Structures are given as C-alpha cells and as structure tokens.
Image (cartoon, helix red, strand yellow):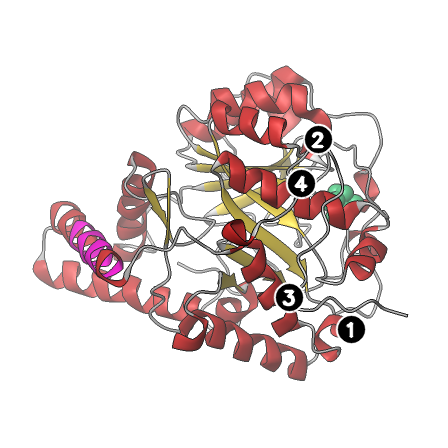
Amino acid sequence: MQTAITLQQIPVVKTKKTAKTISSKQTKNSCQPGRIEKSFTWMLIKLRIFYFACIILKQPAKVWATFKTMVNLRNNVWGGDLKKMYKIDGKYYFNQYTPGWPSKAYDYLIKSELRRHASPLTVTEKLSFVFLAITRKCPMRCEHCFEWDNLNQKESFTKEDLFKVVDLYQKEGVLQFHFSGGEPMVRFKDLLPLIKYTSKKSECWVLTSGFNFTIENAKLLKEAGCKGVVVSIDHHIPELHNMFRGNTGSFDMAVNAIAAARQAGMVTSISVCATKQFIDGDHLMPYMHFAKRLGVQFVQVLEPRKVGHYEGKDVLLDERHITDLEYTFKRINHSPAYSNYPTMLYHGYHQRRVGCFSGSRSVYVDSAGDVHACPFCHTKSYNIIELVRSNEKKLPAKENKCPLFEKIA
Ligand code: SF4
C-alpha cells in the first residue's frame, strides 16, 4: 500500500550530516520580491532590451518588429506574460535556463536573441547553453534514464578533457553550463575545480539526484561559483520516488539536497518525469503543493521519451495527459491563487506551439562525449572528446536538430 503524504507533513530528512529538517521558515519561498519591486524590475529589463535593440538594430521599424517578436515568443513559452521572479544573491531569476539579471551573461543573451530574431536566416547561430554529463557513474537505476547505455562504465572524460570542453564552448559564447551525469556529485573532486574555472565566464548549475549533496558540499559548490541546482524528484510520495529511482534512500537524499542548497544560498529547482501513471493518478497538483513546501523556485515537468531505459516502451503521453499538463502549467504560472507557488517549466507547451530551443540555443554532451540536441533527442552530430584531444579550436558547423519539433528561429 502507498503511504500518502499530506500537505501538513514535512518530508523526512534522516541523514545526520545534512540539514536535519525543513523548517517552516525554510518552506516559505522567501525569494519572491514584492509587487512594486517586481513591476519596477520588469520595467527596467524591458527598457534595457529596448535600449539594446536601438543600439544593435538602429532602424525604428526593425527595433519595434523584433521587440514584438521576442515578447510574443516569451508569451508562447510561458502561456502568457509570466510575472514570477526570484531574487537570490542580488540577482533576479525568471527561468532556470536564463542567467540571473543583472549580469553580463544576461545582457549577452539579450543581444544575441535580438540579432537572431532580427535576421533569423542570416545570423550565425550561437549556443548559449550546454548540458555536460561529466561522469558515467551513478548510484541510481532510474526508470526513465536517458544515459542508461552509458552508465557505470569506464569514464570517458579525463579531468583535462572537461576543462578543454568548457574552453571550447565558452569561446563560442556559451553563458550557462548545467553539469550532469550519471551523478555529477560522484565526481565531486573534479566538479569543484571545474565549476571554479567555468564560473569565471559562465553561470554554473548542477543536475543531481541528491547523492552526496551534503550541506558541506553545497557550501563548497556555492563558494566555487555554482549558482543553482536541479534535483530530480519524481514523486512527492517517498516510496514511489524511491521505486522510480531504484534506490531506497533516494527521496531522503533529494529532499536533503534541496534543504542544503537553500541553506547555501543557491537557486533551487526540482525536476519530475510526468509519466502516464503520475498524471492519471492525479499527482500533479499534490506535487506542486509539495514543491511549494520545499521552497524551490522552479519545477521542471518533463514528458517521458522513448530513449535510454525507456527505449521501445509505451511511455509517450496521450492527448488527455498533455491537456492536463498544459492546464496545470497555465494555472500555476498565471492564476493569482498560485502566485506563491514555484514557476512551472513545461517544454511541451512551447514545443507544440512555436518549436524547440534545443540544438539552436543548447546542446547535450552525454557522458561518452557525444553531442546531441538535448538529453531526450539522441541525435549525435559529433564527439567532443575527439575534438578536444585533437586540439581543435572551433566547434564543427554541424546541426543538432530536434527530430520531433520545429526549431525556434
Ligand atoms: S536518470 Fe540520472 S540519476 Fe537516474 S540512473 Fe540515469 S544518470 Fe542516474
């Protein structure tokens, strides 16, 4: 029998080394600025975008058309004019895939988006974001694992390779790195200097199951320059999460990791693979209540895809599941009743309306060094390890196109 968690229950945190409990103070999302600060911040950002548009595009008609295109795209991505934002360490965060503002990285992103939208056919595409799987090792056995065929074999990347990969992508203007695996915290000794190095030019995040994410390690990561963490939590019911992850201690580890990251002052997000069973069991809203109690800023809802451990399985969502996800996505992000809830990211919403950002803005480097459009689209176009070992100074002009959805200009 399942043990249902109630809203009043605070998830159990057992590990002594990590934060002991999620106190009621911690469960409130205290990073949301007040209404006046939010309105003022949005106004400043829009003015800044407009200012850059005037400088870069010069002609008033082009400035206005590009500005409108970008606003429309944003509304399509979020299902409306998203007002939620979070202030952490003096920076405002609107999305886990956008650098905090104010920062050079944010300004750089705006400028490159303006150029892209003003001349989508002629401008050279610039990557702004990379998922980099730094290890093949992982203590989990997840139902949906997209790295399944690479797991727990001999490492492909040496420490030197990883630094060279970062160099190569930074030369191409990459603004954000999300370090994943396997489980990146298994390779903590290499991860820490890697983040210290990378964060001089780009924003760094860690994608983890929660393994080895103690308060001590969270503080070290933060000191090294890590801005945020995405913890995979695939169910608000501990037993169901543990079953999904194939590890009986995984729920406690995940919840502890969020508590530790919050204590260290990092931006926090949880990620869930919304399976048919999860949606049919009406777990979506209870999961969002749980996320609010954890005090995270973002919740990323992923659709299952037939890759890795899900290869050949009947996992794709039906129309009714997608309708449910879209309804919750709009409700959480725009209804005043949910203004204190974390921002919900659901890529399927914009993918079905305006296309996918993967490939043109971001790539996924798997733990064998193969470069794909994203973790769920295994469309290998080149191997980054071969490139860095041959001292290549430029990325190949190869397209990493999403095979499922149109590419967003
Ligand atoms: S999905 Fe991530 S945490 Fe799960 S087994 Fe695969 S690499 Fe490990």
* Closer to the eye: label 4 or 1: 4
Q: Which residue: 18% across, 52% down?
A: 44
Q: Specify the amino acid type for callout 2.
A: Lys
State the CA–CA distance, disc 4 to disc 1: 32 Å
Residue 356 lies, in percent from the top left, at 50, 60
* Label 1: which secondary element: helix
Viewer-side residue, 384 vs 147? 147
In magenta, the rendered stretch is: 38-48
Q: Position of residue 274 (x, y in %)?
A: 69, 66
The CA span between labels 3 and 2 is: 25 Å
Give the amino acid type for the residue marked by disc 4 in the picture.
Lys
Query: Furthest residue to the right?
Result: 1
| Quarter of the render that holds ligand 1 | top right
How crowded pointer 1 is (Cα within 10 Å; few <14, some 14-19, many 20+) is rated as few
Question: Which one is earlier in the sequence, the residue at label 2 or at label 1?
Answer: 2
Q: Which residue is mark 4?
A: 20
Residue that numbered label 3 is attached to: 8
Q: Is mark 1 within 8 Å of ligand 1?
A: no
Q: Secondary structure at mark 3?
A: loop
Is disc 4 in contact with disc 3, using a CB cutoff of under 8 Å? Answer: no
* Mark linked to residue 17: 2
Numbered disc 4: secondary structure? loop
Q: Is residue 40 magenta?
A: yes
Instruction: Please name the residue that numbered disc 1 is placed on.
Output: 277
Q: The disc labelled 3 sits on which kind of residue?
A: Gln
